[in-house]
Amino acid sequence: NAGVMQNPRHLVRRRGQEARLRCSPMKGHSHVYWYRQLPEEGLKFMVYLQKENIIDESGMPKERFSAEFPKEGPSILRIQQVVRGDSAAYFCASQGGLGGSSYEQYFGPGTRLTVT
Amino acid sequence: AQTVTQSQPEMSVQEAETVTLSCTYDTSENNYYLFWYKQPPSRQMILVIRQEAYKQQNATENRFSVNFQKAAKSFSLKISDSQLGDTAMYFCAFMRYNNNDMRFGAGTRLTVKP
């Protein structure tokens, strides 16, 4: 059973370019979370999605950031017109459901974004 | 809002000895989950141990155990017989029951010395 996959593992973008980060959840999981980790800090929640729905985007910046989880394919976190402050590690986690025994979130290896 | 506090930015321990990492949290909820994650230099987030708030018994996973004090809102991690491979950042995390996002502490950097 493959774990949560994220690609690319490392991404370098110049200021003003777009960054696309992909996350494939564990098989059978329909809940996806995105977190951002700035250097020397803990993870900060950004957005929670289910298939074709954004459930909670309260942690996501209002501008330049968007996320989707289409019916088919991976979840995408998109950052437009990147700035140096966007440099961070972005983690995706998947979950089977809420409550019961399926509450645990399984993390992918992360994508390290560097903006030059 | 829930907050998670890890008051020890860095700690060190001699190999084979025991170390305790502290974590406190603030919530008005009665049902929730608590977690300790390990993040080695590879940056992969690895679940170390979890605790459901409704369970009074402290969770244990091999050399890792927790001291969960619900009234005090404290959730410390004890690592026994420390090994060099335990060197990592350790994050405490809180999640409300039937909710979505996890709240993480700022982390404790643990170094196990030979």
Image (tube, coloured by chain):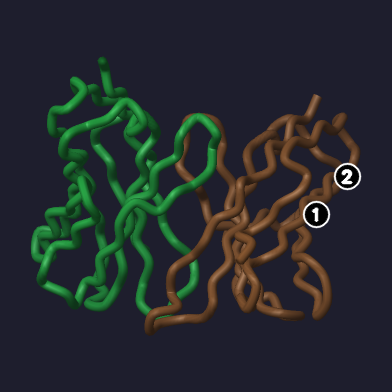
Q: Nearer the viewer, residue B53 or B3?
A: B53
- Residue A98, given in percent of the width and then of the height, sits at 47, 81
Decide which of B96, B35 is in the foreground and name it.
Answer: B35
Q: Position of residue A93 (x, y in %)?
A: 57, 60
Residue sitting at the far right: A17
Give above or below for A46 relative to A73.
above
> Going 36% across and 31% down the picture, which residue do you hit?
B85
Residue B22 is labelled as: none
Asked if B68 appears above or below A91 in the picture, the reply is below
The secondary structure type at the circle numbered 2 is loop
Q: How many residues crowd around disc 2 within 10 Å: few (fewer than 14), some, or many (20 or more)?
A: some
- Residue furthest toward the front? A1
User: Quick check: A50 left or right of B83?
Assistant: right
Q: Provide the residue designation for mark 2.
A: A18
Find chain A in the image and tell me its colour: brown
**Horizontally, is B50 left or right of A106 in the view?**
left
Chain with green colouring: B
